Amino acid sequence: MFIDEVKMELVAGKGGDGCTSFRREKYVPMGGPDGGSGGKGGDIVFVVDSGLTTLVDLKFHKIMKASKGENGKGKNMRGKNAPDIIIKVPAGTTIYDDDTGLVIADLTKDKESVVVAHGGRGGRGNTAFATQEKPAPTFSELGEPGEIRYIKCELKVLADVGLIGMPSVGKSTFLGSVSSANPKIAPYHFTTLSPNLGVVTLKDQRSFVLADLPGMIEGASEGVGLGIKFLKHASRTRILAHVIDMAGTEGRDPILDYEIIRKEIVSYSDSLANKKEVIIANKSDVAGFAENLSRFKKKYPDKEIYPISAITKEGIEPLLIRLRDILDEIKEENIYNDEDYESSIIYRFKNEKPYTITKEDGIWVLKGDEIEKLFKMTRFNEEEAVLRFGRRLKGMGVEEELERLGAKRGDEVQILDYIFEFKE
């Protein structure tokens, strides 16, 4: 089974809670604070495993949750950090934020890794808040919530040369004859429903990776048939090797077949259309080949064309040597298409306020990631923690903004599902 797109919900671990504690020992009547901080919550990390070829393992794990960090304890004992969750994916996996469509990471090398959802830091124990002015604080923090992210993982096959062409023109047969790959081959259309990879090794020991990509049909750039999947995988190859049934079996017209696929490639992406292209004129052992090849060369005199027979292997060795030579000549490409640059921006900086205030049904509703995180980390059963929460809000300009909007003392203010009274 080939799975090339999976959506997941990631919930990183919450940080452990800090501890409010004081030394209580014989002969030490005025022991100071000794509450330890909580441990960090578990991250969710994606790592490339070269042994994987599909995302099928993720299909059955739609929600991944990391563990909470251990709570701090007395005697300044810090809680243990929670273990990270490691998710293994094949090379060529692109991870998108499903809410924004922005690229989080593009993993192309073995053992390459990225933290996709960060665990929350541990809440500080009361020891961490001790100062000269207040040497014995009676409050501590709760652990920071872990990140929650909705992501889409998309696998694009990474290969040096991509075999493209209409269904049943001999791509799989060619791949099987030049590599150790064992693609499914049968005399009907769309035998190849997912990419097959093979390693080609030349007599001079040079090698390259060849991909047999699903056959195209007209309308592929608009999603018809296997089109979008085909084009997506083709964008990750360095050379397009266009396989054409030059004998015109099944009543095909080689020129028309070629023009249909070129049209779809141009419609999909300029960067894909501009890739180096080689024409593989297949089925030289079949009647009608020479006549069609002559017509094709007359129509496209500037194309680099290699007549071969995938069955008899005639003409294959010079073609493989030329493909390897081209790979040696061309430079490495950017892994993104030109059209993807905007969507590959991971972070965008904002100058707006870190919160919003609206009035709904007579209640002032306060929203913002920083404020909500502060709220979740505050112990409201500790008086000093409540006072600190109020000071932090005031320092962020919340009180001043409420007054500017017309809030009066005694009005109700809501943060998440909790409602407070607006007062000094």
Image (cartoon, helix red, strand yellow):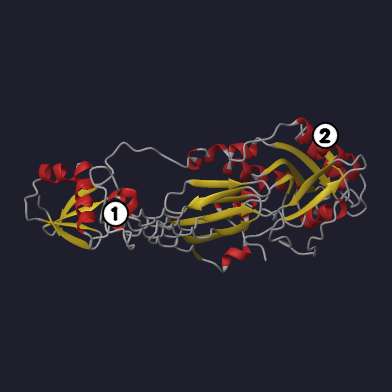
Q: Which SS class for mark 1?
A: helix
Density class for disc 2 (Cα within 10 Å; few <14, some 14-19, many ≥20) is few
| Image coordinates for residue 71, horizontal then vertical, percent | 41, 62
| Image coordinates for residue 374, horizontal then vertical, percent | 29, 52
Callout 1 amino acid: Glu
244 lies left or right of 386? right
In the depicted view, which residue is nearer to us: 89 or 408?
A: 408
**Which residue is depicted at the point 75% across and 34% down?**
300
| Residue 140, quarter of picture | bottom left
- Residue bearing mark 2: 325
Cα distance in 3D space between marks 2 and 1: 58 Å
Density class for disc 1 (Cα within 10 Å; few <14, some 14-19, many ≥20) is some
The number of discs equals: 2
**Which residue is depicted at the point 44% across and 62% down?**
70
Looking at the image, is mark 2 or mark 1 earlier in the sequence?
Answer: 2
395 lies left or right of 300? left
| Image coordinates for residue 279, horizontal then vertical, percent | 78, 41
The N terminus sits in image quarter: bottom right
* Residue at the farthest bottom position: 60
- Residue bearing mark 1: 372
For residue 129, the mark is none
85 lies left or right of 136? right
Q: Which SS class for mark 2?
A: helix
